[in-house]
Amino acid sequence: MERPRRRNTALLAIVAALVVAGGCARLRLARRLGSAKSTAPPPRVDDARGSRLIVPHLTGAIVLDGDTDDPGWTSSGGPARTGPFALPTGAPGRPYSDARIVWGDGHLYVALYAADEDIRSAVEPHDGPLWLGDSFRLVFARDACERTIDVSPTGTVTDAVRRAGGSFDYSWESGAHVSTEVDGTVNVSSDADEEWAVEMAIPLDSLEMRGEPGEVTGFSVRRCDTAKDGSRTCAGWGTGELEFAR
Ligand SMILES: [Ca+2]
Ligand SMILES: [Ca+2]
Ligand SMILES: [Ca+2]
C-alpha cells in the first residue's frame, strides 16, 4: 500500500527584522562608543573554530516544495553538506540526519533530512516549544547575537534572538520560508514512518548578513528525535562556521 505522503507549506511573512537588527547594531555601536555594560557576560559566539563549511553560491533555481530535486541542490558544485549528524561523543546519530546549504538571492537555503520511524510533531503554534517533539534547531551566532530557528515536521517555526548571552526574545522573526515533506503519518505511532524533510529559505537581512563572498557566521544545527520506545536522541553538526564561497 502506498505510504501516505503529506506536504505542508507555510510561508511566513518577512517582518520585524529591522527592529531586531537595529538591536544588535545598537549593541555594536554602544561598544564602539564605550558605553556597553562591562558586566555583560561574554557572548557564546564561535567558541569552536575547528569546523568551517564553505557554502557555495546558488547555481540554479530552488522551489520550496520539500523536494530537493531542484537544480540549485543537484547541479555541479552543489550545496555544502554537513554529512551525517553526530552525537556529542562523535558517534553517528541514529536515526540519520543531515543538512545541505547554499546561499544566493538574498537568502540562505537549507535542506534538512531526518530519517524517522515514528514522526512526532509538537502541536504548538508559531514561537511555541517545538522542541517537545521531533525538530531541527539552527543557530546563527554573529556580533554577540545568537539567533535560533526551530522547525517541526509540519513546518511550524519558532525563532528567537538573544544578545550577549541574555534571555531569548521570541518576538524576533527570521522571516524564514519553510516547506516540509513527510513520508509517514505524523503523531500516529501504530505504523512505521520513513522520513521527513525541510526545505527552507532564510532572508540574510534577518541574520544581519549582507550576502557577500567571504562572509562568515557562527553556525550549528541539531536534530532531536523521540523514538517509538519514547527514548530521546539529539545529534547535530557544529558549533562551527559557515563561510560564503568567494
Ligand atoms: Ca524543492
Ligand atoms: Ca521521531
Ligand atoms: Ca519569533
Image: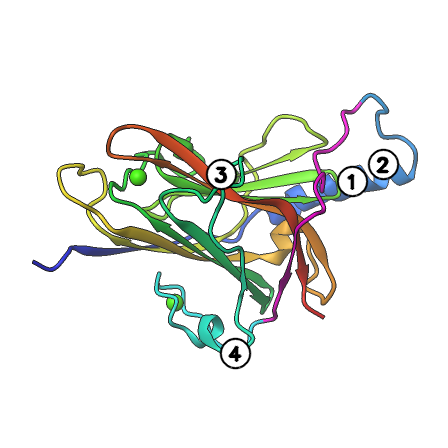
Helix, strand or loop for disc 3: loop
Q: Say which of 196 and 210 sits in front.
A: 196
Q: In 3D space, how far apart are the residues under numbered discs 2 and 4 (Cα atoms)? A: 44 Å
Q: Which residue is mark 4?
A: 76
Q: Is the CB atom of the residue marked by disc 4 within 8 angstroms of ligand 1's nearest atom? A: no
Query: Which region shows up in magenta?
Result: 40-57
**1 and 2 marks in contact (CB < 8 Å):** yes
Q: In 3D space, how far apart are the residues under numbered discs 1 and 4 (Cα atoms)? A: 41 Å
**3 and 4 marks in contact (CB < 8 Å):** no
Going from N to C along the chain, the mark reached first, 1 or 4, is 1
Helix, strand or loop for disc 4: loop
Kindly identify the residue that appears in the image at 82 percent across and 21 percent down. 39
Q: In 3D space, how far apart are the residues under numbered discs 1 and 2 (Cα atoms)? A: 6 Å
Of the four image quadrants, the one with ligand 2 is: top left
Vertical placement of 88 versus 115: above or below? above
Q: Which residue is mark 2?
A: 30
Going from N to C along the chain, the mark reached first, 2 or 4, is 2
